[in-house]
């Protein structure tokens, strides 16, 4: 009985947050014990402009590809503290995105779709499993970036870290 009540409580919480998002434009599904994004969520907010989305502190293993299609004008995405290891190519079309928190996931290879996010000013990838970054390509691809957090990526070698510091644009706040 407690599992059923707990599930019902979770559904109610998600529905309430979808209703709140209709007015605020901020879909906050953080800490909802979600493992995937149900189509019902998209149906509940259909026709409303959502510009900020948080799925922080859930159990996502895959990035919900539909996010890009359903929230085309998103400017902020917080997907921190999940178990996401790969970012789909569709993310590259998210031209309005300015802030992306993908901290504390299981990303080991720098997501190439991020390099297409020309308006990105904030990127947090701390606490992942990144091993390598093409520093030259990274800095030239993200000209608007002013804050970058790569701390807690133990696989990033000393040479990569040195290059990140040496080639860092003056305006960029870099955390290693």
Image: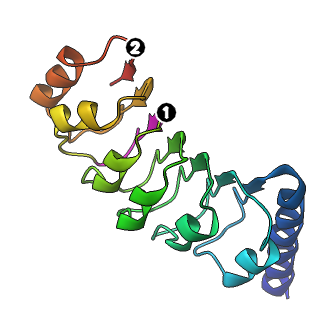
The picture places residue 80, in percent across and down from the top left corner, at 53, 49
Residue 41, x across and y down, in percent: 74, 75
Please tell me whether residue 35 is drawn above or below residue 171 in the rendered image: below
Q: Secondary structure at mark 1?
A: strand
- Vertical relation: 63 (above or below) 172: below
Q: Quadrant of residue 87?
A: bottom left
Q: Nearer the viewer, residue 150 or 171?
A: 171
Residue drawn where x is 47% and y is 48% of the image: 102
Q: Please report the residue visible at 54 percent of the width from the left and 39 percent of the height from the top.
A: 98
On residue 122, which mark appears? 1
Report the span colored magenta: 121-129
Q: Main secondary structure of the magenta part?
A: loop
Which sits in the foreground, 172 or 174?
Answer: 172
x, y percent for residue 169: 30, 17
Q: Which mark is residue 171?
A: 2
Label 1 near label 2: C-beta < 8 Å? no
- Chain-order first, disc 2 or disc 1: 1
Please tell me which residue is depicted at 58% across the width and 73% down the height of the picture.
Answer: 35
Q: Left of 45 or right of it: where is 130?
A: left
Tell me if residue 175 comes above or below residue 136 in the rendering: above
User: Where on the picture, by quarter, is residue 126?
Assistant: top left
């Amino acid at each position: 009985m407690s599992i059923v009540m707990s599930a019902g409580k979770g559904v109610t919480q998600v529905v309430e947050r979808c209703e709140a998002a209709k007015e605020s434009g901020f879909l906050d599904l953080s800490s909802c014990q979600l493992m995937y994004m149900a189509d019902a969520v998209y149906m509940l907010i259909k026709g409303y402009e959502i510009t900020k989305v948080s799925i922080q502190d859930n159990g996502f293993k895959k990035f919900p590809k539909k996010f890009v299609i359903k929230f085309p004008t998103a400017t902020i995405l917080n997907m921190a503290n999940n178990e996401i290891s790969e970012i789909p190519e569709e993310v590259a079309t998210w031209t309005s995105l300015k802030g992306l928190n993908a901290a504390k996931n299981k990303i080991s290879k720098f997501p190439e779709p991020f390099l297409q996010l020309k308006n990105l000013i904030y990127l947090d990838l701390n606490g992942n499993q990144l091993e390598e970054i093409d520093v030259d390509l990274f800095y030239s691809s993200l000209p608007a970036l002013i804050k970058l957090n790569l701390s807690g990526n133990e696989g990033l070698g000393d040479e990569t870290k040195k290059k990140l510091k040496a080639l860092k644009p003056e305006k960029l706040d870099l955390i290693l």
